Amino acid sequence: MTVDRLLDIAVTINPGFYLIAAAVWAVFARGPGSRGVALLGGPALALLALLYAPASGTEITRSFFLGFNMSLYRPDSLSMIFGFGFVLAAALSGVYSLHREDRMQDSAGLLYAGAAMAAVFAGDLISLVVFWELTAVASVALVFARQTKQGQMAGMRYLLIQLLSGLLLMAGVVLYGLDAGSFLFADLGQLHRGVLIGMLDIHAPGGLLILAGVGIKAAFPTFHNWLTDAYPNTTETGAVVMSAYTTTLAVYVLARCFAGLDWLVWIGAAMTVYPVFFAVMENDLRRVLAYSTNNQIGFMVCAVGIGTPLAIDGAAAHAVAHIVFKGLLFMAMGAVFMRTGTTKASELGGLHRTMPWTTLFCLIGAMSISALPLFAGFSTKSMIMTAAHTPAMFAVWLMLLFASAGVLEHSGIKIPYFAFFSHDSGKRPKEAPFTMLLAMGLASALCLAIGIAPGWFFELLPYRSVAMAFLAQDLFTADHLLVQMQLLAFAVLAFVLLKRLKLYPTEQPGVILDIEWLWRKAAPAITGVLGRLAGRLGVWADKAFGRAGAGLISGSGQIFAPDGVVARHLPLAGAAIWTVALLSFVLILAMSSPG
Amino acid sequence: MNAFIDFYAAPPGLTAHAAPLLVIGPLIAACAAALSPSTRSAWMISVGGTIFAFWMALCLAGEVARNGVVNYYMGGFAPPLGIAFRIDALGVMFALLISGIGVMAALFSGHTLEAEIMKGKRRLYQSGFLLCVAGLLGLSATGDAFNAFVFLEVSSIGTYALIGVGVDRRALPAAFNYLVMGTIGATFFVIGVGFLYAATGTLNMADMSGRLATLGDSRVVEAGFAFIVIGLGLKAAMFPLHGWLPAAYAYAPSLMGVFLSATATKAALYLMARFLFTVFGPHLDFVGLFLTWVMAPVAGAAAIICSAQAIFQTDIRRILAFSSVAQVGYIMLGVSMASAEGVSAGLFHLFNQALIKSALFMALGGLAFNIKATKLSDFSGVGRTAPWTMTAFAIGTFSLAGVPLTAGFLSKWRLIEAAFAAHWLWAVGVIAVSSLLGLIYAGRMLETIFFRAPVSEERAGEARFGVLVPLWILAAASVWYGLDASLPVDLSTAAAQALGLAPAGAAP
């Protein structure tokens, strides 16, 4: 009886809170057993809470903040699939990080996962903003966790960008909610074929601010540098954790708020294309993965912009699959980083001799991200490609196609080739620790499971029937397979040709000039000049006002300081005289009053 | 008061006698504490007595929410012959505040008395503290002018003794000073009450108010008024009659700092508001003149001058003490507007100040245990060695300076709104300037505590757990009421209505 009641209450709690509770536990956890409970028990509890979640669309509304209605837990099919992805990510990164005892990192990772999870299950804009900010705080802790000078600087830049995004979002939400009269999702938009998507109006006050705030987190073009700056600068686990949540959460918010917004189609298409060039040229393999994240998020943003049921399904499915295979790639690179201390392509090569398992798992991840048939990326990205394959969007479709070839180029071939094969660097590192291999193995199994038999996975998608129909009619048709295999074949050909002709640029160590140059070099230069000017002005002002200021300070000091005129200890007689004076004044005033 | 309308804290039989029990509870506890066998048992009695008083205050809050006013005639003798307790929304607000802070202070006292009071006097100290609580609670409950004087003296006599007993010898002259000034104040008050008795022939406040209305212009009444407001002004540390306060708060044992800063001046303010608005009424010319030409200017002067003084202090507790006088200025500024908005904003500010100041003094008192320090510079870098204590201190300081998302911000905001509504633009300016000064001294404290390097090798450890619990309750309340201020706003609005001030727009 009591147990039933407790369980009833337990399933009405936002599953993210279980992960946040585990994060608190992790702060105090000592020893492998206790850490294991936090790192694996938290995700397990959250998974249970997901399985037993209340019916879709149930609101658990509480009047809480300054009289506004808040809904801390509103599960529906869109939030379920993202929540599922986040649980997977939390569990995988938990296993992956078991080898190294770092309480701050454990806790920050769990908090990050919990906040992201809580955000996708929030049912109003205010709670969404709160959890959104919490993810930023947790992720900053991860960037700072790699305690190098470079890490610190990257952490500061990252922190600034995250705060900017949070501020924009908060300002937008306040404007929007006050104008609309409610912050609850249920009041703001209506269901599209049973799912609440695209609920905000971009033209309403605050709409653009919200899009800008989310856009920064989704790493829209020209705002993408925080991502390529921060991910390579964290610890091996940090990159795995970070790749899973921030951008995925942004995709969720875009789908929830702006699905069907046509700008997003073009923004997304642009996002898929331009990182390809940077990724091909980049030497640091973790940074290559960061660019490839950017490119993959582009596919999702584009799909969200298309906004048809199949496209939304594709965006959600690809987001979750991306968590798994990008996580897998980051795990493999993390293992390399841990064993060799570098992820620079020019310093690596030939590691397959001593790290065979890592090589195998990395290959599976690479094939998944390149959307090779029977691997995860194929099942999910095909949905997006099919949704974009309409006459009206032919240009977009071509851009996506080009980007797909690029993915294969930089993530599918380049990552495993330069790390594990290529020329022999002479490094003979040990194989990764068992827990890392276990995490990679689990992720690989998931990639294959989604790729070979996607039925169970499509069951979870927001528009289930659309996804199942796609699986039955389109996915494994000869036509579709042929296009994909052609693409892959030509990409491989291009790679081989470039290598043969020694045109492939990767192995030249160097720095790529990206937009970030503007705010890493130009902005400090400008502020430097302004600062020197201000310094001059300050010296002048110092002379001019110095005397006046000093006079004022010493004057007020003489008056107010403990032994000054006003505050000097008043003798009793003095106090009594004040009293009498005031009394006389009041007496005169009262007696002279008319009437 | 809507929050309490369905609030039944005790069975009806007990609730019926809650008014006298509110005062008698701590009074009996005071005797018991004096006779108790050990320091520890005296402390438990002290905690129990204050919790009982808080419970009774909650009972009264429910009754007042339902019935408006609770009248209780001692021994069944109706006024004007008998002594009556008359508790309305204003009285309940103060009873809740005094007893609530009393509980916190009593919890806090368990650990600090050992460090600050000589061994043989600790039980008596608790006894005096309870006496003081009883007196202040009686003040908020009584409906009789002379009875109010008695309660004022009961609390004051407790206070004089308690300030002087500590180990800090500077407390002795401070206590003597307070004794003389307080006695002058009480004497003035009783002289004023005497004048009123001569003019009206009654001591019951409600009765007195009715007869004054029919009396017309009377020199006797006017003289009585002058003596009463100046007498209470002394007790409430109305600028420039605040000379006794900084030393008394700064050098007294920390328990007194915690309790007095939150309640003593506030209770005198309560009585002043009671006389100004209930007994006399703002419609009388001399009351209006006093509010506009005496109270408002001195309140403004206090807010600015004492904030400036706080900036230049070197002793951290004197900073807080001068800040207290400045805050009394804010409260009086609100009261002197004589509008529902102004008075309720002032009372709201009073409520927040009580929470903030007791939290701040509590944090310092908790540390005094570890470092025998009073100067601000002695607290350099303490934030690193005592993070929990000093984080609570920082929250209190933020609220004191009026940082958004704290209670202090909301009450200042409402004061500014009320000043605009009353077209007192100069008051808006005063609040703005004084807030800036407040930011300076708050910033100075936080800078020293958190960002300076520690001065000595001696580590200032965390305050004891028994101190941290009440400290964090108070700090959390400051934040909570900064987010959801419905309870204090509710209380202060109802209190302003109980003073006969209808909000603008409502039917007169």
Image (cartoon, grey):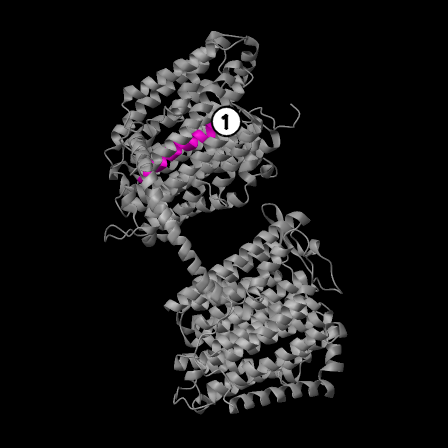
Magenta residue span: B316-334
- Would you say residue A203 is visible in this rendering? yes
- Would you say residue A23 is visible in this rendering? no
Question: Horizontal placement of A140 versus B89: left or right?
Answer: left
The vertical placement of A303 against B146, above or below, is: below
Majority secondary structure in the magenta region: helix
Q: Residue at x 53, y 45 (%)?
A: B483
- Closer to the camera in the image, A153 or B456: A153
Image coords of residue A558 (percent x, y): 28, 31
Chain hosting mark 1? B
In the rendered image, the quadrant that contains the C terminus of chain A is top right
Which residue type does callout 1 highlight?
Val
The vertical placement of B344 against B467, above or below, is: above
Image coords of residue B316 (percent x, y): 32, 40
Q: Which residue position is annotated with label 1?
A: B335
Image coords of residue B114 (percent x, y): 28, 43
Give yes or no for residue B317 being in the magenta stretch.
yes
Question: Horizontal placement of B25 versus A549: left or right?
Answer: right
- Closer to the camera in the image, A320 or B500: A320
The vertical placement of A177 against B280, above or below, is: below
**Count of numbered tags:** 1
Image coords of residue A478 (percent x, y): 73, 88
